[in-house]
Amino acid sequence: MTNVIRVKNLEKIYTDGEVETPALSGVSFDVREGEFVAIMGPSGSGKSTMLHILGMLDRPTGGQYFLEGKDMNSYLDDELAHLRNTKFGFIFQAFNLLARTSVLENVKLPLAYSGIVESEQDKMAMKAIEAVGLSHRINHESSRLSGGEKQRVAIARALVNNPAVIFADEPTGNLDSKSGGQVMEFIDKLHDQGHTIILITHETYTAEYAERIIKLKDGKIESDEKVSERHRGGFTK
């Protein structure tokens, strides 16, 4: 498989007046196309900073980030925004749904500036909603859904553009154990379908759905190992 992501000697330093705080220090790794990678670490380890850089929500202070062989530094900000909207899907802990908006409209959000006609947007969104088992909730306002259903809407929204890479940022953090398990099974199924998954988590159980775990500590890679016994639950709607 080819590398979809490569980072070399990645650095990120936050500056507050004269105080500099390093968040990432010389981080290097590759992610192959179709791989399921978990990035773990305690608070302050740099995993959120890593997500922001890999998701092109922020730029590194030093080092290089290659997406499909092209250096991130060669892109202008508007080009990065276009890449985020076409190449990436995001699943967040807080769901980030519009409360008084239907499931269908929430899932269509990434298509808003795509230039795709409205009828085709509806078809794409309905296909993604069906994939997460929520066709019966398509016209419900997101505020009326359970936590597990909200996260499944977020998964559908991440899927709607058929992205190359899906970033899942603590996707089970606001869910009970049963709903969290179901969400991880959905994410695992996306991996089985060929999506590259990058999971940000502090939970070992969640991380072990991945094929490989990268552990960060104080902005550096502490370990990078394959998972010997992955959690593989049955797919549950």
Image (spheres, rainbow, N blue to C red):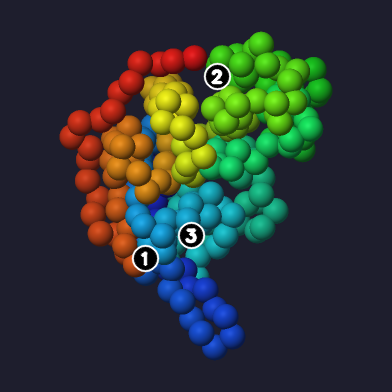
Give above or below for 128 relative to 184: above
**Image mark for residue 98:** none
Residue denoted by label 3: 49
* Residue 140 placement (x, y as % from top left): 73, 20
For badge 3, the amino acid type reads: Thr
Q: Nearer the viewer, residue 174 or 31?
A: 174
Earlier residue among tags 2 and 3:
3
Secondary structure beneath disc 2?
A: loop
* Residue 82 placement (x, y as % from top left): 66, 45
Neighbourhood count class around disc 2 (C-alpha, 10 Å): few under 14, some 14–19, many 20 upward? many
Q: CA distance from mark 2 to mark 3?
A: 29 Å
Secondary structure beneath disc 3?
A: helix
Q: Nearer the viewer, residue 186 or 111?
A: 186
Is residue 15 toward the left or the right of residue 21 in the image? right
For badge 1, the amino acid type reads: Gly
Q: CA distance from mark 2 to mark 1?
A: 35 Å
Task: Check the image and name the residue furthest to the bottom.
Answer: 18
Secondary structure beneath disc 1?
A: loop
* Residue 73 placement (x, y as % from top left): 54, 61
For badge 2, the amino acid type reads: Val
Q: Residue 130's quadrant in the figure?
A: top right
Q: Nearer the viewer, residue 137 or 230?
A: 137
**Are the two marked residues, 1 and 3, in contact with CB atoms closer than 8 angstroms?**
yes
Residue denoted by label 1: 219
Neighbourhood count class around disc 3 (C-alpha, 10 Å): few under 14, some 14–19, many 20 upward? many
